[in-house]
Image (tube, helix red, strand yellow):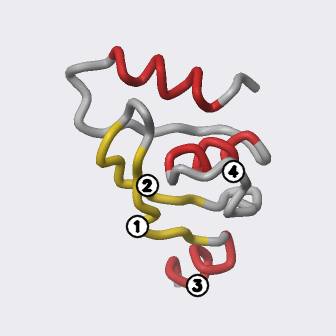
């Protein structure tokens, strides 16, 4: 996977989008989340099928807020 900073540089070029959905695998998504939250260290450890919502206040440089994170177990319970 590419460096998260490169991803945010590309996202900054997209002027029309108000929402962006990213899909990927750990540990790369954990790196993207950390970068979005302004951290150099991974703050999360997403499991397979885990999801997170980041509200970006600014794309370049990234500044965001972790609105929520759901583990696969939480999602299975919610589906019942």
Residue 77 falls in image quadrant: bottom right
Viewed as shown, does residue 48 lie left or right of 59? right
For the residue pair 41 and 71, the one nearer the viewer reads as: 41
Which mark is first along the chain, 3 or 2?
A: 2
Q: Label 1 neighbourhood size at 10 Å, few (<14), some (14-19), many (20+)? A: few
Numbered disc 4: secondary structure? helix
Discs 3/1, front: 1
Residue drawn 55% across the image and 25% down it = 7
Q: CA distance from mark 1 to mark 2?
A: 6 Å
4 or 3: tag closer to the N-terminus: 4
Residues marked 4 and 3 touching at CB (< 8 Å): no
- Which is more N-terminal, label 2 or label 1? 2
Residue 54: numbered disc: 2
Percent of width and height locating residue 64? 40, 52
Q: Position of residue 29 (x, y in %)?
A: 66, 44
Q: Give the residue at mark 4.
A: 30
- SS state under label 2: strand
Q: Residue at x 58, y 28 (%)?
A: 5
Q: CA–CA distance between discs 2 and 3?
A: 22 Å
Vertical placement of residue 38 versus 67, above or below: above
The earlier-in-sequence mark between 1 and 4 is 4
Position of residue 67 measured from the top left corner of the image (x, y, whole percent): 40, 67
Name the quarter where the N terminus is drawn: top right
């Amino acid at each position: 996977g590419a460096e998260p900073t490169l991803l945010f540089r590309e996202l900054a070029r997209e002027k029309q989008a108000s929402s962006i959905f990213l899909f990927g695998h750990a540990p790369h998504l954990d790196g993207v989340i950390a970068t979005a939250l302004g951290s150099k260290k991974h703050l999360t450890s997403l499991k397979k099928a885990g999801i997170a919502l980041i509200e970006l206040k600014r794309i370049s440089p990234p500044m965001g807020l972790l609105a929520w994170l759901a583990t696969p177990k939480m999602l299975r319970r919610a589906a019942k």
